[in-house]
Image (cartoon, coloured by chain):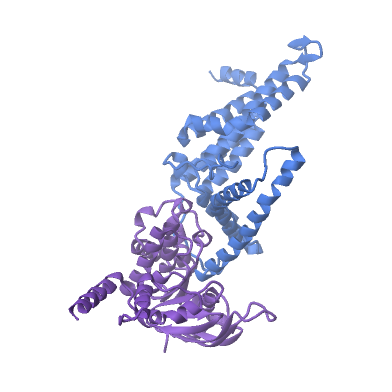
Amino acid sequence: MSFIEARGVEFSYSPDEEKVIKNIDLKIEKGSYVAILGHNGCGKSTLAKLLCGILTPTEGQILIDGADTADEEKSFEIRKKCGMVFQNPDNQLVASVVEEDVAFAPENLGLPRDEIRKRVDMALATVDMTEYKEHATYKLSGGQKQRIAIAGMLAMSPECIIFDEATAMLDPTGRKEIVAAMKRLNSEIGITVVTITHYMNEAVEADRIIVMNKGEIIADGTPKEIFSEVEKLQSVSLAVPQVAELMYLLEQDGHPLPRGVLHAMEAADLLEAYIKGAKND
Amino acid sequence: MLKDVTFGQYYPGNSLLHRTDPRIKMLILIEYLVLVLVANSEIAALLSLAFTVFLIAVSGVRFGILIKSVKPLIFVLAFTAIINLFFTVGEGEPLLNWGFITIYANGVRNAIMMLLRLLSLVLGTSVLISFTTSPLELTDAIEALLSPLKKIKVPVHEFAMMMSIALRFIPTLIEETNKIISAQKARCADFESGNLLKRIKALIPILIPLFVSAVRRAEELADAMECRCYNGGEGRTKLKVMKSRPADYAFLLAVTVLTVAVFFLNNISVSEIINLCKAIF
């Protein structure tokens, strides 16, 4: 059974408004690293809220580890399993001191003190913020605040963390820190990571990309597959990573180069081989 | 405009007052207020003054900070002293009779007493609570002391949570206000000229965006708290548990004795004490 399963999900904020999410079927396996890509207003943030149970679908159902998000009795269990990091780092910190904030979730779970202490220290070490544990949260930078928010989720020891445009308000340095943290959570601790973003370079890091447009899934596959379909992405106003675009343009010019190349070094090697080959001919 | 608003007045330290259990400090504060307001005779006033000096001495707060905290009150202090000096109608010969100004010995006494009392109140409460207790300790202490009210369904936990969140958001909202002010100034808003009414009206374009964003923040924070399994106060544990040591109880007892002593000394004048001493020796 998949960890998250959406069956025919539709959603609108009020009955007379247009549907924000239309007929989505989706399975996300445990331990995977999924990026959901989409243009502004395509419903990706709404989907994120649906996937962790903050919103419940108006039509269809979402199962998290077999529990229906519409089932009020199971909502606590679902929350425990599936955490979420939001866009604005300022609006999700509850306490004024770093370690107090990280302790918020385990305190809510009613864990004994020693266990809370252990989890807080572990979570802060994972995001590399141990030295800041007694600092005031408002004095931290955006990237640091967001790392504290991640630590706050980790202290709950969830099986899945959804990042709802968690890097959108950060500077490039902060963004790198958070993407590195996501990768580490996924590969080292085995947490299922779902990241909602409109930065292509972040999506490249994932194992699987889901592209959304106007509330529907229009493409689903590995980064290589997704970024091979340059025209499709451009038709929904999404840019492809620079490297992929370069290869695409060269191909359009009649050079037989492979599509879906995502990393600069890989592209450089391919181009070198191609140029050498052309000279020899 | 809001540059000189400092967040809270807490000065981290490790003095006797810093280490005292915040719950005990709250109780001591209540006794202290009674003590200062009740002390009426010279000897009682002297005792309360001595205790205030003692509190200041053990708080380890720098002298400059104390001066800074009294500065904004100079006008009020001077006004009270002058009112007492000129308008107390005493018995016997006036000390000074100069036109419409008449000063009695009693007036001088009242003025000094009032001045000392106000000064004690300001400095004593500051060193006892605001300078030496972190906001979080303070809310925890209030929650603990009011917890008996939970039995009659007073939402004590919710109240304390609201308070700590309010404190957490002060710096965030100040920063935001400064940003809005800059943004409005860049659009040629004028906050400094015109009469009072005009200047109050000029604040509207600051307040409306501020309120809108505060509401939005609150909504997001509520989602974030729910995601971290917040379910109200029931079954919640704490990372930091307040512990009172024997020394804390001893401190409380000492202040209680002092307060009772002040009640007794109120009815005894200096001459009576001198007589008492003579009788004993």
The chain assigned the colour blue in the figure is B
State the image coordinates of residue A32 (x, y, percent, origin top left).
37, 80
Residue visible at 44% across and 61% down in the picture: A146
Q: Which residue lies furthest to the left in this view?
A: A280
State the image coordinates of residue B177 (x, y, percent, origin top left).
60, 49
Name the quadrant containing residue B155: bottom right
Decide if residue B122 is in sight here: yes
Query: Which is nearer the eye, B216 or B32?
Result: B216
Name the quadrant containing residue B51: top right
Image quarter hosting the C terminus of chain A: bottom left
Please tell me whether residue A9 is drawn above or below residue A76 in the rendered image: below
Decide if residue A207 is in sight here: no
State the image coordinates of residue A20 (x, y, percent, origin top left).
59, 79
Residue visible at 62% across and 27% down in the picture: B116
Query: Which is nearer the eye, B262 or B50?
Result: B50
The chain assigned the colour purple in the figure is A
State the image coordinates of residue B79 (x, y, percent, origin top left).
70, 26
Horizontal arrangement in the rendering, residue B61 relative to residue B219 (left or right) = left
Query: Which is nearer the eye, B86 or A72?
Result: A72
Q: Number of marks in the image?
A: 0
Please tell me whether residue B39 is drawn above or below residue B244 in the rendered image: above
Please tell me whether residue A49 is drawn above or below residue B127 in the rendered image: below
Query: Which is nearer the eye, A115 or A63?
Result: A63
Image quarter hosting the N terminus of chain A: bottom left
Horizontal arrangement in the rendering, residue B177 relative to residue A148 (left or right) = right
Name the quadrant containing residue A41: bottom right
